[in-house]
Amino acid sequence: MTDNLSHAPAPAVTAASSGRAQNVKIRARGVNVFYGAKQALFDVDMDIPDRTVTAFIGPSGCGKSTFLRCMNRMNDTIVGARVEGAITMDGEDLYAKGLDPVLLRARVGMVFQKPNPFPKSIYENVAYGPRIHGLARTKAEMDHVVETALKKAGLWDEVADRLSHPGTGLSGGQQQRLVIARAIAVRPEVILMDEPCSALDPIATARIEELIDELRRDYCIVIVTHSMAQAARVSQKTAFFHMGRVVEVGDTETIFTNPRDTRTSDYITGRFG
């Protein structure tokens, strides 16, 4: 990746479907990803706007999650993985030699398919990250951080009287909201979600989708989903991946009603995938 960004242009501005001009939060140019000798992504170019939900859609194995993991360097944890090209956030090179991936993952949080609360209390699940990063100096400050994160995740009213209970004792949908609260607690700028509703029932899914819509007011959100209906409901921008390449990126309404590429149309209408 490029280390010197002193001559990088000012962040571009893109129009979201709401009509507002929005700053690009993450910019990718010429991104290629290899797992050993196998290439998983080819020349990905994309601008991801701030305070917007961007959905990645496409068949299984097309590179959606691989690209998602590039944005907080989770691919670094895979032996033999190699990323080429440039990915910047607010103009900062995410692959610069001096950048600490652990600190980056606090700024770019991740929510996985299956809820993965720690085997700790509800309180300690949320407090874990802020404690590691020194975001609260006193018990009162930590209490405020935990309460704020749980409220933003829409979970406070359900767990306020049992914060000492195990997080693993919550329902699946509650566990996923707890994981989202855990990500929010370290004050991220971006939240990545890799099929966050795939293990949830329809009622829990609807609650998570409502939460995503609320969170986009404060965060840049990127979601990988196999559900066309979900992408249409929660996102303002959609990118269609196919065989390791980005076929088409645009406003969600346009992608679903008037796609430019026949492959996009074929996937959305169920002709393949």
Image (spheres, rainbow, N blue to C red):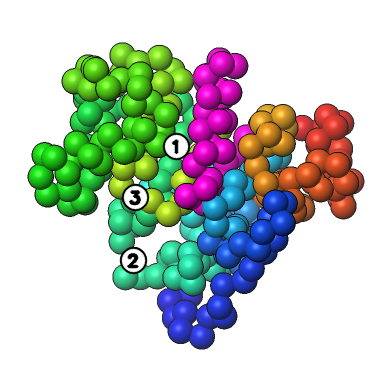
Task: Give x and y (percent) for residue 249.
Answer: 73, 54
Q: Earlier in the sequence, mark 2 or mark 3?
A: 2
Mark nearest the camera among 2 and 1 is 1
Q: Answer yes or no: is residue 268 visible.
A: yes
Mark carried by residue 203: none
Point out which mark residue 111 bears: 1
Q: Which residues are magenta?
A: 197-225
Disc 2 marks which amino acid? Leu
Q: Are marks 1 and 3 in contact (CB under 8 Å)?
A: no
- Residue 238 is one of the magenta-drawn residues: no
Task: Give the spatial CA distance, label 2 vs label 1.
Answer: 22 Å
Element assignment for label 3:
loop
Can you tell which mark lies on residue 99? 2
Magenta stretch encompasses residue 217: yes
Taking the image as shown, residue 10 lies to the left or right of residue 191, namely right
Answer with mark 2 or mark 1, whichever residue precedes in sequence.
2
Farthest-out residue, bottom = 7
Would you call the spot at circle 2 few (<14 residues within 10 Å), some (14-19), or many (20 or more)?
few
For disc 3, the marked residue is: 187
Q: At which x and y percent is residue 89?
A: 48, 64
| Depicted 59 relative to depicted 220: above or below | above
Identify which residue, 19 or 205, lies in the foreground: 19
